[in-house]
Image (tube, helix red, strand yellow):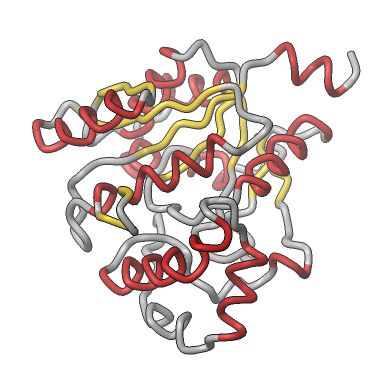
């Protein structure tokens, strides 16, 4: 079959891994960003992606996440509640609940994720002989402008066979640590999207301040329809903005 026929025959679903518990910024996914929750901003962006067939929030059965699940139900977002500690199992079960074939892994802290990057990741996955298409392991994109695409069947196999706690916590980690088994296609940013030093993710209070500033300055002219290029242009015009959270450090999975 041609690429488009193959793509049409397989259901592509983005699962958002999110919970209210966070050691660095508790409750961050429901933090207010210009009158909309942080996760609401992310969902709006994912809904603009053309290559997704569905979105599911993969949160936990912890009572602390009741508010998050209630938000999803009010907003018409599919929600699955599973294990708090075993994120791998939670994501697999969430994807199964949506009858998925292809997983687009998204974390709830990617509040400024550009839907064009999601579409590019899905297209790259279908157009190449690969098991995983991603931009997260070899830095070229901003932090938080992440896309990871792979089959649910492959993820189910990892879930059935691997007990390593780090793998159970970091859903796709096993793929990257075993290049002898998986064909990983690493996506590198074109010049218009390239800046691996910029933080667009939401982990710290400083990240929240930066994201609020970006929305306050870009939303009046663009609504939610601004992407990396507009963010880069804003930061060139106001170089003090990326300094707000530049010192914040990313936590490595291992």
Residue 36 position within the rendered picture, expressed as x and y whole percent measured from the top left: 33, 49
Residue 51: where, in percent of width, then height?
68, 31
Left or right position of 232 against 210:
right
- Rendered residue at 40%/72% (across/down): 213
Across and down, in percent, residue 37 comes to 30, 48
Relative to 243, is 119 on the left or the right?
right
Nearer-the-camera pick, 79 or 33: 33
The N terminus appears in which quarter of the rendering? top right
In the displayed structure, 199 sits above or below 99; it is below
Residue shown at 17% from the left, 26% from the top: 61
66 left or right of 89 in image = left
Q: Place residue 34 in its image quadrant.
A: bottom left
Q: In the displayed orientation, state which residue is furthest to the front.
A: 220
Give the percent coordinates (x, y) of residue 160. Answer: 42, 19
The residue positioned farthest toward the left in the image shown: 63
Above-or-below relation of 192 to 45: below
In the rendered image, which quarter is residue 188 located in?
bottom right
Q: Residue furthest right?
A: 2
Residue 202, relative to residue 30: is it above or below?
Answer: below
Location of residue 197 with respect to 77 vertically, above or below: below
Q: Nearer the viewer, residue 229 or 136?
A: 229
Position of the C terminus, as image quadrant, is bottom left
Q: Identify which residue is drawn at 83% across, 21% down.
A: 4
């Amino acid at each position: 079959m041609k690429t488009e026929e193959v793509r049409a025959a397989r259901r592509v679903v983005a699962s958002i891994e999110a919970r209210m518990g966070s050691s660095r910024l508790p409750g961050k996914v429901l933090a207010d960003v210009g009158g909309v929750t942080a996760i609401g901003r992310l969902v709006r962006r994912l809904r603009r992606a053309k290559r997704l067939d569905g979105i599911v929030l993969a949160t936990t059965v912890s009572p602390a996440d009741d508010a998050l699940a209630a938000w999803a139900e009010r907003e018409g977002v599919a929600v699955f509640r599973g294990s708090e500690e075993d994120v791998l199992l939670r994501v697999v079960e969430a994807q199964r609940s949506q009858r998925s074939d292809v997983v687009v892994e998204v974390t709830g802290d990617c509040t400024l994720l550009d839907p064009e990057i999601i579409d590019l990741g899905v297209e790259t996955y279908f157009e190449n002989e690969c098991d995983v298409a991603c931009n997260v392991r070899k830095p070229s994109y901003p932090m938080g402008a992440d896309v990871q695409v792979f089959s649910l069947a492959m993820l189910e196999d990892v879930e059935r066979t691997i007990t390593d706690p780090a793998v159970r916590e970091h859903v796709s980690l096993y793929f990257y640590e075993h290049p002898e088994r998986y064909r990983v296609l690493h996506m590198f940013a074109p010049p218009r999207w390239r800046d691996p030093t910029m933080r667009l993710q939401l982990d710290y209070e400083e990240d929240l301040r930066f994201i609020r500033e970006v929305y306050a300055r870009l939303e009046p002219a663009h609504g939610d329809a601004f992407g990396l290029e507009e963010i880069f242009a804003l930061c060139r015009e106001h170089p003090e903005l990326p300094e707000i959270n530049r010192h914040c450090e990313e936590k490595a999975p291992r």
